[in-house]
Amino acid sequence: MMKSVPWWQSRIAYQIYPRSFCDSNNDGIGDLRGIISKLDYFVELGVGILWLSPVYRSPNFDNGYDISGYREINPEYGTMEDMKELLTEAKKRNLKLIMDLVINHTSDEHPWFVESKKSKDNPYRSFYYWRPGSVDKKGNPVPPNNWSSFFSGPAWEYDRTTQEFYLHLFSKKQPDLNFENPQVLAAVKDIMTFWLDLGIDGFRCDVINLISKTTLANGKKRIALTGREHYITQPGCHKILAELRRDVLSKYDCFTVGETVLVTTQDAQALCPPGRKELDMIFSFDHMDCDHINNKWFKVPFKPYKLMNILFKWQKEVDWNTLYFENHDQPRSISRFGSKKYPQQSAKLLAVILFTLRGTPFIFEGQELGMTNATFNTLSDFRDTESITVWNLATKLHFPRWLKMKLLRATSRDNARTPMQWNTQDNAGFSFDTKTVPWIPVQSNYKEINVETEQNQKDSLLNWYKELITIRKRTPELTGGSFSVIYQDKEVYAYKRSLPGVGKFPDRETYVVLNFGGKKRQIPQEVTAILDALPEKTVLASVYDDTTCLPPYGAFIVKNTDKNL
Ligand code: ISL
Ligand code: CA
């Protein structure tokens, strides 16, 4: 019959940001037991893969993306016993679980780095990139090259003990591991094996296309990420990934999704070749770059066609990709791509796109509720190291306070990190004790936007997500089918997903029609011609009851049900 697709293609994934998901012991910090207590929520929603952002031991300078113990659980989140219980309970419910694998860098508090800092001949010295640099006229140390870090400022930090610099593409508390050293790769293989043996189902690999640095020469001077041509998707990266696949991943029924920065569709195809030689799919950022110029802090007004053009390009040029509108680093999609006038409808339209394109859809916690960007008013509400660094930089450049606040409110990663909104109680049910103060403020709109309220509202966004997930799972062409565009202008889009028939089974076809704009539109002639020609069809879902026209942010899914497909 139908060619079956692997489970990591047919299931829908859900990203949990553990610190902000559910606090079981009222210390204001989300934890593993909190996640365990909510597992039935995922079953009800219909997702099949959970991605846990890092829960390893960490000083939490970058909320766990700075690991100081790869085989340990951060005590704030619980114990290894809790982790095992989470895996057991997830398995009981047929939920797969993947973990974040952060191997481009460790924390500066990781024992490897602590050792490596001690002396030039320490056995761990070459686990990291240490270089002498030079001295300027005043006798100050000058970094070995001109590379800049992702969080702004130079990518090198001087260390007095040995009077050398170390490389950090992110903060100075995140030194880059040196994959030229075979011991580093061997240690990473052991870590991966440890977790796969414990029963996890794969990894989301943090900034995985940065792990190989071809040379440490100066880079071309740029506004951001000077040096990037020497470390983004280098040949060495393919080599390492192929080796990890061969020696570790291929031995398990698991999958990997790589977070890859600045990749083209060609890079994507090369990183995820058929036959699973490297990664299974990637998170690309092209579509996340559609509303800014140069870098994410320079926002420009959102134009739906820019987003759709990029999504369509990736649909056409990459065989299998992730589908996502949010994660823990991005502003909320309803605030960013949605309409102020039609928030519900536009969020529903975004969900239609998410669940009807080819690829594996990823939901970020709270997205299914329509959680919005944070409405913080003071710098002291922000927690993210990147936001604080940018604020301080803007202060040095004499930006007025209102402008700094505007930048942070539009772009800060904290927008995605406010506590999950479970109910109408104080703290939105994130911490059960209403006297607890969560680590980051709860959004003021939690009384309307929360799980409990939306469960009881027939036309809520949460119920829309459930409905679309059910439809996607029942409609194989929405998962494995090919994609073709039928119509597009600046607001109205129509596309077809189809699977060829096999034997006596006819072709399967499902159509999606949507209006990504605030004005009512007629369904274009090209589209009606096709839909009218179908002898029998069924509307699987529609934002509005009426499917004869396209009201603001109207969107519907139609299946060709001729011959009882
Ligand atoms: O938000 C960004 C910085 O402006 C992104 O460029 C982000 O840093 C990049 O996508 C890499 O993200 C990942 O690695 C970082 C970590 O801080 C992010 O949370 C993680 O998703 C370093 O580990
Ligand atoms: Ca807690």
Image: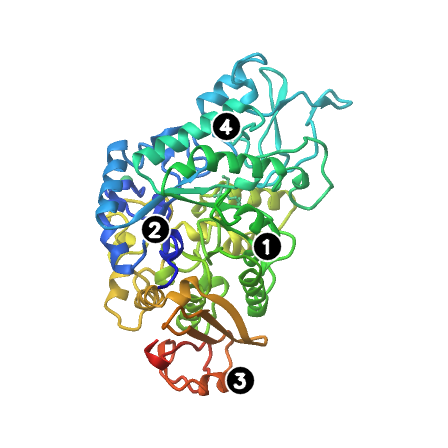
Q: Which residue is mark 2?
A: 49
Q: Is residue 66 left or right of residue 459?
A: right
Q: Residue at x 47, y 76 (%)?
A: 514
Indicate the amino acid at tag 3.
Pro
- Give the x, y percent position of residue 306: 59, 66
Which quarter of the rendered image does ligand 2 occupy?
A: top left
- Give the x, y percent position of residue 91: 25, 45
Sequence order check, earlier mark of 3 and 1: 1
Q: Please determine whether, in this image, residue 27 is positioned above or below residue 123.
A: below
Q: Quadrant of residue 500?
A: bottom left
Q: Quadrant of residue 41?
A: bottom left
Q: Is residue 274 left or right of residue 195?
A: right
Query: In this view of the protein, can residue 184 be seen by the observer?
Result: yes
SS under mark 2: strand
Sequence order check, earlier mark of 4 and 3: 4
SS under mark 3: loop
Name the foreground residue: 245 vs 376: 245
Indicate the amino acid at tag 4.
Leu
* Label 3 to label 2: alpha-carbon separation: 38 Å
- Give the x, y percent position of residue 277: 50, 42
Disc 3 crowd rating (10 Å Cα; few below 14, some 14-19, many 20+) is: some
Asked if the residues shown at circle 4 and circle 2 are in contact, with their CB atoms under 8 angstroms apart, the answer is: no
Asked if the residues shown at circle 1 and circle 2 are in contact, with their CB atoms under 8 angstroms apart, the answer is: no
Sequence order check, earlier mark of 4 and 1: 4
The N terminus sits in image quarter: bottom left
* Label 4 to label 2: alpha-carbon separation: 27 Å
Residue 144 badge: none
Sequence order check, earlier mark of 4 and 2: 2
Asked if the residues shown at circle 3 and circle 2 are in contact, with their CB atoms under 8 angstroms apart, the answer is: no
* Label 4 to label 1: alpha-carbon separation: 27 Å
